[in-house]
Image (cartoon, rainbow, N blue to C red):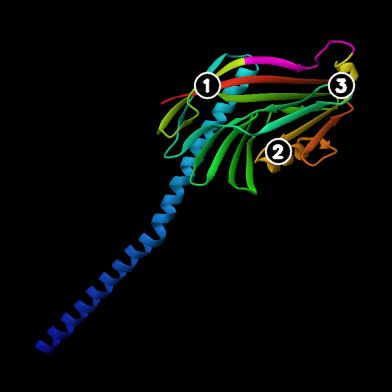
């Protein structure tokens, strides 16, 4: 009887040891594999929310350049990221056979979080994972058809505070100026009658994505230099510039 009791006690002890070991190993695996995955899911969700917020900003800025509003406000959740008004990106537009050849410092608005950026730049929205991994979230307002070309240049300038790291921020965009840059005259010199080709060059850290846009947008063709694209054989072309001042309300 005592021997039977000892065997049962040993079996119980072995069972307890195995069960405890399984629990310990499971907790260890969850700690090693599960938590990083949960953290990645949380990070991706934060970036997706920021991307959706930047798309809303782009839509609001489009209303400003189309004169459907003078001020627009959008709220963004930064979630440990930062929001900055950036300098540097430039758009050069040239109308062939005219004196119109102008470079615009368009700037932009950029959200950054753990090495990934979401950038509003000249009407387009880009998500950048690395230098060679850039996705176009929203297409820019540039069109080239068989009959005409329309290039909308959107310059973003900082009104006061140009950077914020608060948890929530209201992005206030105000249309400062809206101008038709080309044609400069209705008839004669520097008018549409003088030009039948339009060249656009974008100088930006996101130039590769811009190139993909022009290559896929239809009717744009490669220009004489790298990064330059042509819209030719057209009857009309318009270049308009909108200056939007941006401030943050936290």
Residues marked 2 and 3 touching at CB (< 8 Å) = no
**Quadrant in which residue 24 is drawn:** bottom left
Does the magenta segment cover residue 178?
A: yes
Considering the numbered disc 3 on the image, is that residue within a helix, a strand or a loop?
loop
Q: Position of residue 134 (x, y in %)?
A: 63, 44
The tag earlier along the polypeptide, 2 or 3, is 3
Q: Residue at x 51, y 31 (%)?
A: 53
Q: Which residue is mark 1?
A: 159
Q: CA distance from mark 2 to mark 3?
A: 25 Å
Identify the mark at residue 98; answer none if there is no mark: 3
> Which mark is nearer the camera, 1 or 2?
1
Q: Which residue is mark 2?
A: 210
Considering the numbered disc 1 on the image, is that residue within a helix, a strand or a loop?
loop
Query: Could one spot residue 55 in this view of the protein?
Result: yes
**Quadrant in which residue 97 is drawn:** top right
**Horizontal side, residue 1 vs residue 175: left or right:** left
- The boundaries of the magenta stretch are 177-188
Residues marked 3 and 1 touching at CB (< 8 Å) = no
Quadrant the N terminus occupies = bottom left
Q: CA distance from mark 3 to mark 1?
A: 34 Å
Q: Residue at x 55, y 41 (%)?
A: 117
Identify the mark at residue 99; answer none if there is no mark: none
């Amino acid at each position: 009887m005592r021997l039977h009791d000892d065997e049962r006690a040993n079996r119980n002890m072995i069972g307890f040891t195995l069960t405890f070991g399984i629990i310990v190993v499971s907790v260890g695996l969850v700690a090693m594999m599960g938590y990083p995955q949960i953290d990645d899911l949380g990070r991706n969700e934060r970036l997706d929310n920021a991307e959706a917020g930047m798309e809303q900003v782009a839509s609001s800025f489009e209303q400003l350049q189309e004169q459907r509003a003078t001020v627009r406000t959008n709220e963004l959740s930064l979630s440990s990221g930062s929001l900055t008004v950036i300098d540097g990106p430039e758009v050069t537009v040239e109308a062939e056979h005219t004196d119109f050849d102008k470079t615009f410092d368009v700037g932009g608005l950029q959200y950054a979080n753990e090495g990934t950026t979401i950038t509003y730049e000249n009407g387009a929205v880009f998500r950048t994972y690395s230098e060679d991994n850039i996705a176009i979230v929203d297409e820019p307002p540039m069109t080239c058809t068989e009959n005409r070309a329309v290039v909308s240049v959107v310059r973003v300038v900082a009104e006061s505070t140009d950077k914020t790291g608060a948890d929530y921020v209201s992005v206030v965009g105000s249309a400062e100026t809206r101008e038709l840059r080309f044609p400069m005259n209705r008839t004669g010199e520097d008018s549409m009658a003088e030009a039948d080709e339009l060249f656009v060059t974008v100088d930006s850290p996101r130039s590769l994505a811009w190139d993909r846009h022009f290559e896929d947008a239809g009717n744009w063709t490669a220009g004489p230099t790298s990064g330059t694209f042509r819209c030719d054989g057209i009857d009309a072309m318009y270049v308009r510039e909108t200056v939007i001042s941006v401030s943050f309300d936290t």
